[in-house]
Amino acid sequence: MMENSDLEMWSSKEKWWGDNCLGRVDGFWLLPQFIQSIDRVVKHFKPLPSDIILASFPKTGTTWLKSLLYSIINRSSKHRLATKNPHELIPILEVQVYATSNEPLMLTPSSSSINRSRRLFSTHIPYQLLAKTLDSSECRVVYVTRNPKDTLISTWHFVNKWIKAKEGSWPLEVATDKFCRGVIPCGPYYDHVMGYKKLSLEKPNNLFFITYEELMDDPKTHVKKLAEFLGCPFIGEDREEQVEEVVKSCSFEVLRNHEVNKSGESPTWFPLPYNSFFRKGAVGDHKNYLTDETIDRIDTLTREKFHSSGFMYGI
């Protein structure tokens, strides 16, 4: 990672939406306001063996996975999801924890410190930038990915909720082209996914790789697998009821209807209201927006980036 974030960022930049630019760092396009904090994470974050890190590309199911992970680890405190947004319960390393200092911000009871022996964090930082950090630790990482076409549509909707979008929306045609070229926050998407996919094959005991579609198709089975991976399996005669309760309390409909997640207020760490993190949560929503030609373009890219590497996913 670079020693001087600003100089490195501005030596390689590109517009991705209107006058908004991204900085290119080690092959990935990052939002300028987070490059210095990402640099802090890379240089100063020392994960403990007991830490759990949820990694993901933006808009691939992060909010849902945060809810599930929190409920699995803090079963007696899962009711807190009714009063706290999942992003407050599991802070983002580069956005909340290392936002302003080389020292991590104190984790208050409203964040991941309920279970003091298991710290929970999340990140959108690509593995390629975090390799030394993760490879030197026995911490456990959960990575979630989502169909590239649905990821594109979810990203497009999310960006158009930004305040800047009032000055001019992000056209879907532009968003599609930027996505395919990899010039979107944390992109290229395919490189981001494959970095963690390869790690899951090399260190299956340390990285749990799951797709949004798998989880949607059979949440109970995968919640049980997640609990076993995290070292806290469901036990007792009522374990099936325990699993069902976690799945139900973390369902999209239940979470979306909590007052905190319907709120139009914005957190201190990101200029978007809490309700912007809950839109639709559906599989296949891209069919309502993308033309056949665009779908073919993305599928061709998916075959090249995923299928050629043996990862048969995304189409």
Image (spheres, rainbow, N blue to C red):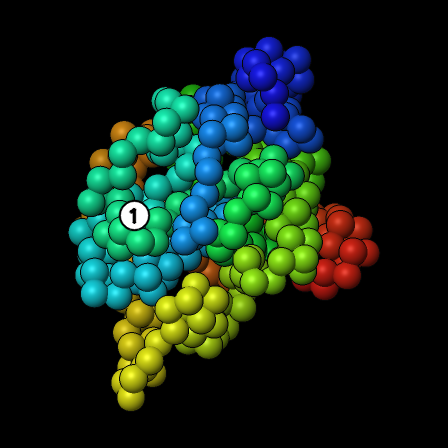
Relative to 109, is 251 above or below?
Answer: below
Residue drawn at x 67%, y 28% is: 26
Please name whichever residue, 240 or 106, is drawn nearer the observer in this view of the structure: 106
Residue drawn at x 29%, y 77% is: 242
Relative to 145, is 44 above or below?
Answer: above
Q: Is residue 16 visible?
A: no
Q: Is residue 111 visible?
A: yes
Does 299 sit left or right of 244 as displayed? right
Quarter residue 104 falls in: top left
Which quadrant holds the C terminus? bottom right
Does 315 sit left or right of 220 as displayed? right
Q: Which residue is mark 1?
A: 112
Please name whichever residue, 163 or 118, is drawn nearer the observer in this view of the structure: 118
Does 296 sit left or right of 3 as displayed? right
Q: Count neighbours of disc 1 (C-alpha within 10 A) and say few if under 14, some if 14 to 19, many if 20 or more.
A: many
- Residue 182 at x, y percent in the picture: 67, 36
